[in-house]
Amino acid sequence: MKMVTAIIKPFKLDDVREALSEVNVTGITVSEVKGFGRQKGHTELYRGAEYVVDFLPKIKLEVAVTSDQCDRVVEAIQNAANTGKIGDGKIFVYDLDRVIRIRTGELDGDAL
């Protein structure tokens, strides 16, 4: 089993959600986060004063999938979140040792 974590631009969330449903992903966790990478933030003008916005708003997606689904999920996220511009985000893939569904006690693949 794998945990796929993606950091994407906020306006791409609906596109990524649709792409994931097309590859039969039944659940995702979405968090609003802030951060920066190569994009480094930007400067804005507010009431005549210039200030630096260091951390940019992003969306963090977490998807637990079986190992055989992983490549399709990563490809779906990559294709849907791509704008071709700096700041498109990153995808991280981790191994999952154990998954337990709290309500039923199902384990691992059955719990997904």
Image: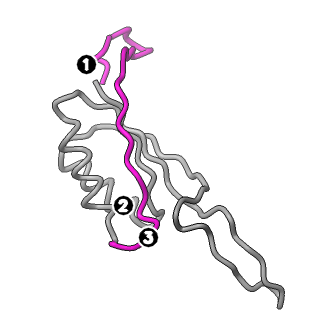
Rate crowding at label 1 as few (under 14), some (14 to 19) or many (20 or more) other CA atoms within 10 Å: some
Query: Gap between marks 1 and 3, in whole Å?
Result: 36 Å
Among numbered discs 2 and 1, the one appearing first in the sequence: 2
Front residue (pair 80, 41):
41
The residue drawn where x is 43% and y is 58% is 89
Compared with residue 67, is residue 103 higher up or lower down, i.e. above or below? above
Q: Which residues are magenta?
A: 84-112
Q: Position of residue 108 (x, y in %)?
A: 30, 15
**Label 2 amino acid?**
Asp
Instruction: State the residue position of label 2.
Output: 14
* Mark 2 secondary-structure assignment: helix
In the picture provided, is 96 more to the left or to the right than 76? right
Q: Which mark is residue 40?
A: none
Query: Gap between marks 2 and 1, in whole Å?
Result: 26 Å
Instruction: State the residue position of label 3.
Output: 86
Q: Residue furthest top?
A: 105
Q: Quadrant of the N terminus?
A: top left
Q: Position of residue 109 (x, y in %)?
A: 25, 19
In the picture provided, is 4 more to the left or to the right than 37? left
Q: Is residue 93 magenta?
A: yes
Among numbered discs 3 and 2, the one appearing first in the sequence: 2
Instruction: State the residue position of label 1.
Output: 109
Rate crowding at label 2 as few (under 14), some (14 to 19) or many (20 or more) other CA atoms within 10 Å: few
**Label 1 amino acid?**
Gly
Q: Position of residue 69 (x, y in %)?
A: 19, 35
**Label 3 amino acid?**
Ile
